[in-house]
Image (cartoon, rainbow, N blue to C red):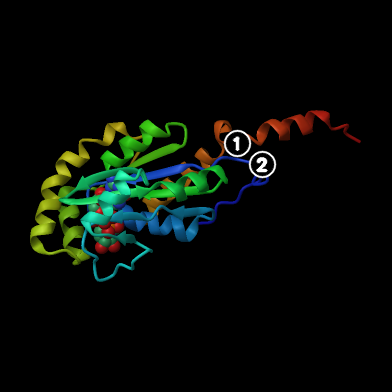
Amino acid sequence: MQIASSSAHIRRRGMMLVLSSPSGAGKSTIARNILDEVPGFELSVSVTTRTRRASEIEGVHYHFKSVQDFEMLRDNGELLEWAEVHGNCYGTPRKPVEEAIAAGRDMLFDIDWQGAAQLREKMPDDVVSIFVLPPTMSELLARLKRRAEDPEDVIATRLKNARFEIEQWRDYDYVIVNRDLNGAFGEVSAIVMAERLRKERRPGLEDFVAGLLAEKPD
Ligand code: ADP
Ligand code: 5GP
């Protein structure tokens, strides 16, 4: 689905679109769809101490780091937020985000509720947050198993943590149920379109309206 815009020429500040969900609910799949289908989005590539999955590419899905390197980045203030999730550390590199937002480019974050809370606190005007729920707990387990990229004990930990993660839904601006992918993607696209039109994100409107009012119609 392509989002057309009749006012793309008006200068704006980028948004930070945060997607969170219990593991397996489908946020990475939705995130991939947005990156493929909605022009103007880039992914915030996190650093993590987790082991790489077979399908993952260094620098594309994550920057895979040793615990020591992760701690160095964190202690040097190079991470905008960080958290321990399912026994591994994850964090968001600061520089690419600050550059993108200032240049009017939107960024997508696939991060957990702890990271979302930190970003909301630090950059409240820039963050738009969406929580993705699974349709049922049985379907959540089925999806974790179907992904087939994590060992049994890792799947069990993730399912055990899901209940607590789901309880964080109230802190988000929007909540969607990922029953079918098209429906969920359509809802996220609608949120993106509306949020891009918020006047607070569009400093260029001042000049645009001033120009309109200065115009002498023929
Ligand atoms: P998360 O990033 O939330 O951990 P993923 O995006 O990796 O979850 O999705 C987990 C699994 O569920 C993947 O195999 C994915 O293809 C599948 N999946 C995602 N959304 C749906 C959906 N709406 N219907 C069926 N399967 C889905
Ligand atoms: P996974 O190991 O399945 O890729 O991710 C596990 C969890 O960590 C997911 O909930 C994912 O959103 C979250 N996560 C990934 N990157 C970051 C990050 O940079 N910061 C935080 N706080 N969570 C992250």
Q: Is residue 24 visible?
A: no
- Tell me, yes or no, whether the two marked residues, 1 and 2, touch with CB atoms within 8 Å: yes
Which of 90 and 130 lies nearest the eye of the viewer? 90
Q: What residue is pinned by disc 2?
A: 10
Residue 65, percent across and down? 27, 59
Q: Is residue 198 visible?
A: yes
Residue 129, percent across and down? 38, 39
Say which label, 1 or 2, has the lower sequence index.
Answer: 2
| Element carrying mark 1 | loop
Left or right of 85 on screen, residue 106 = right
Quadrant (top left/top right/bottom left/bottom right) for the C terminus: top right
Q: Disc 1 residue type?
A: Arg
Q: What residue is pinned by disc 1?
A: 202
Q: Residue at x 45, y 48 (%)?
A: 95
Q: Residue at x 29, y 50 (%)?
A: 72
Left or right of 45 on screen, residue 200 = right
* Distance (Cα) linking label 1 and label 2: 7 Å
Quarter of image, ligand 1: bottom left
Vertical placement of residue 125 versus 161, above or below: above
Which of 207 and 35 lies nearest the eye of the viewer? 207
Left or right of 12 on screen, residue 129 = left
Q: Residue at x 38, y 44 (%)?
A: 18
Q: Disc 2 residue type?
A: Ile
